[in-house]
Amino acid sequence: MVIDYAFIWAGIIAFSVLVYVVMDGFDLGVGILFPFGRSEADRNLMMNSVAPIWDGNETWLVLGGGGLFAVFPLAYAVIMPALYMPIILMLLALVFRGVAFEYRWRTKRWKPVWDIAFFGGSTIAAFMQGIALGAIVQGIEVANRAYSGGWWDWLTPFSVLTGVAVVIGYALLGATWLNLKLGGPVQAQMRGYARPLAIATLGAIGLVSVLTPFQDIVYFERWFKLPGIAFSMVMPALMLLTTWKLFTGLRDHHDLTPFLASLALFGISFIGIGISFYPYMVPPKLTIWQVAAPESSLKFTLVGALVLVPLILGYTAYAYWVFRGKIDPEQGYH
């Protein structure tokens, strides 16, 4: 039996990116909603809801980026020059946001500054992630196996749309997470925010979905010719079912259901992007196999991944188990 190591590694990278988006997405969403806390105590609770787990969530970003560099070096060499600016801005935003977790509890005079850093870092990081996604979807110029586009190719109306869509979507994840983790007036406030955010998220997903097939003929043929046209019918059905669960969960004041439904919206959208991309790693020019490292390297690194990924999943699951349940307003992050 022939084992396709490049395909396996593409699956691992895709899984890492998906887990990062759904897990770090909700804590970035908490930062986006942070200024809307009605009091200092409410904002403290909002930050406390993600304080024990936010840095673990970002492990998946490191795994995805590091894995891309190690096993798909040509893809890394093409994508990075195309997206230097949004990626650098995203990383700087994540740094300021991470520092804010520690510094805002250690100062009174500068607390407003770190509050802004927490909100601004979260929002800019989310926006830049969406920008990068849009820039990849619209296509990267490649010539002689190298990036051949311009410095500002990543900034287009479509990439700005995807950036705004990700910010809105992360805010929805944050609202449903706070609905899950908090009680009392803050929970009611965030449950109220979740409804319009869900409508805006669905509108953004719909608009991006309509425009994506027109970014390149490859996408159009994938979605509107057999066998891909079958996915064009299945994916909206899944979206409708997930949307129903989200809104009925909010209506019935459920804690967990809206959060899981919001995660499912992102998961379905991610699968849709994967259907559009496959088998390209740098759409629409370079396939998974064209950008992969030599098979010996893929085998060697896969051994480490088979050990590392279950370990990360294990300690992540344990952390969420330890910090399960509602946040106690009397307990702080120190």
Image (tube, rainbow, N blue to C red):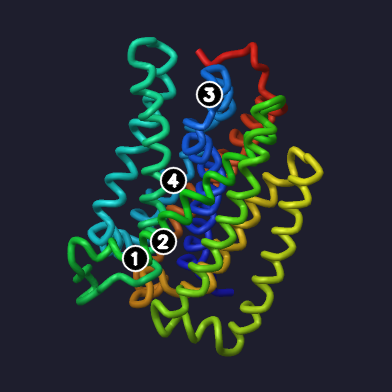
Where is mark 3, residue-wise? 43
Dot 1 alpha-carbon crowd within 10 angstroms: few under 14, some 14 to 19, many 20 or more: few
Q: Nearer the viewer, residue 213 or 308?
A: 213
Q: Amino acid at mark 1?
A: Pro
Dot 2: what SS?
helix
Where is mark 2, residue-wise? 161
Where is mark 1, residue-wise? 157
Disc 2 vs disc 1: Cβ atoms closer than 8 Å? Answer: yes
Q: Quadrant of residue 285?
A: bottom left
Q: Is residue 265 above or below residue 231?
A: above
Locate residue 130, reporting x and y percent.
41, 55
Q: Amino acid at mark 3?
A: Arg
Residue pictured at 30% horizontal, 38% vertical: 92
Dot 2 alpha-carbon crowd within 10 angstroms: few under 14, some 14 to 19, many 20 or more: some
Q: Is residue 215 left or right of residue 5?
A: left
Q: Amino acid at mark 2?
A: Leu
Look at discs 4 and 1 and give the one toward the viewer.
1
Where is mark 4, residue-wise? 61
Q: Is residue 251 above or below residue 51?
A: below
